[in-house]
Amino acid sequence: MGFIDDPYLAMFVKKIYERHWKDDIKELLILVNGNNRKVVDFIKEYWNYDEKVSYIETWYEPFPVGKLYTTLYPHAKGDIIQIMDMDNFILRKNVLSEFGSQITSGGYDVIGSQSHAASRRIYELATSKWGHSRLNDSMLLIAKRILDQVEDVDFSRKRWNAGDHIKPLGWTVPTTFPPDYRQQYECADTIAYLSFQIWAITKKIRIIPISCPDYIHAGSLSSGVRNLLRTPDQKMTLSGIPPPTPMHNVPLERVAWWYHIYTSTYAECSIPGFNEKYKQAILQYAKRYNITEEILKNMTRATMSMYPTLL
């Protein structure tokens, strides 16, 4: 599991982990990454003494999520490799053990959702060949016996230039690109290339929804500290980097998630001054919608009433 430098999200995940899925796993591997060294160190200490954390690593810079999984993988010892995004929340006990039993019994080799984050020709080739394109990293379980057969266990996103051969697809990138392409290369998002290799090995794959009554993928909560939650002058994010994009609107539900996660955990944050910075950044962002804190509280209660086991 990877954590960005958001202390409240890391603490919230731990609360849900202890409540709903700690008993379902044998070990937990963590990589904490981000520019804010104080936050990275805080998260490491917060998780470090949990008895199921078998490996923890820190990087004081943003770490691409695919590279993160590739870095953690050699340290895993279990028969099932599970990936879960930090904003994917399990809503009840036994969800992961039930999925795991479907793999250990031999019924499936892989269980996960899918998405189609790849350039058009890559997507068309993959779906015509296997009926699938890319496994999603929001929540994914893979039998270790399958990964042992994969030639290149690399979870990273990929880019292929003209003349590059993509072995699982049996296809070499042509020297000319379609007129609708804005870029002169082919590409695929995190875990796509690994997915192609898995499709070529096994058909015992269960595709599940990205969200359902047993779990919810809240989605893009990391856009808080690394982009939209900023200092009062708007010049820096709370992660301590210049904003990567202009300020823009996001679904109000995401603002409610940020507020709920913050108010559920801030009492445990010992980083001097960070509570006030984070809260003010949320309220500053809410002003884009002319939302006061009282309205935000009511909106948050309404949003989280759909997920009573996360309260």
Image (tube, helix red, strand yellow):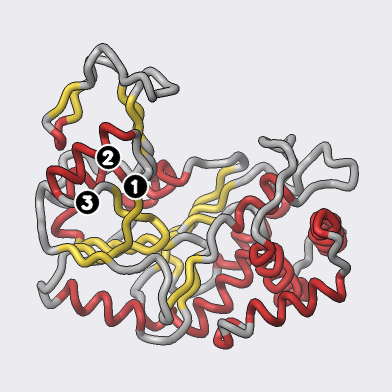
Q: CA distance from mark 2 to mark 1?
A: 7 Å
User: Residue 127: x and y, percent?
Assistant: 20, 46
Most distant residue in the top direction: 175
Q: Residues within 10 Å of mark 3 (few under 14, many from 20)?
A: some
Q: Which three-letter amino acid code belongs to the residue tagged 1?
A: His
At 15% across and 37% down in the image, what residue appears?
168
Label 1, residues with CA under 10 Å away: few <14, some 14-19, many ≥20: some
Identify the residue under disc 3: 132
Q: Residue furthest front?
A: 179
Task: Give the amino acid at mark 3.
Answer: His
Q: Nearer the viewer, residue 274 or 60?
A: 274
Q: Residue at x 10, y 50 (%)?
A: 201
Residue 104, horizontal then vertical, whole percent: 16, 74
- Counting residues from the N terminus, which is met first, the one under dot 2 or under dot 3? 2
Q: Quadrant of the N terminus?
A: bottom left
Reading the image, the residue beneath label 2 is 123
The residue identified by callout 1 is 116
* Residue 132: percent from left, percent from top: 22, 51
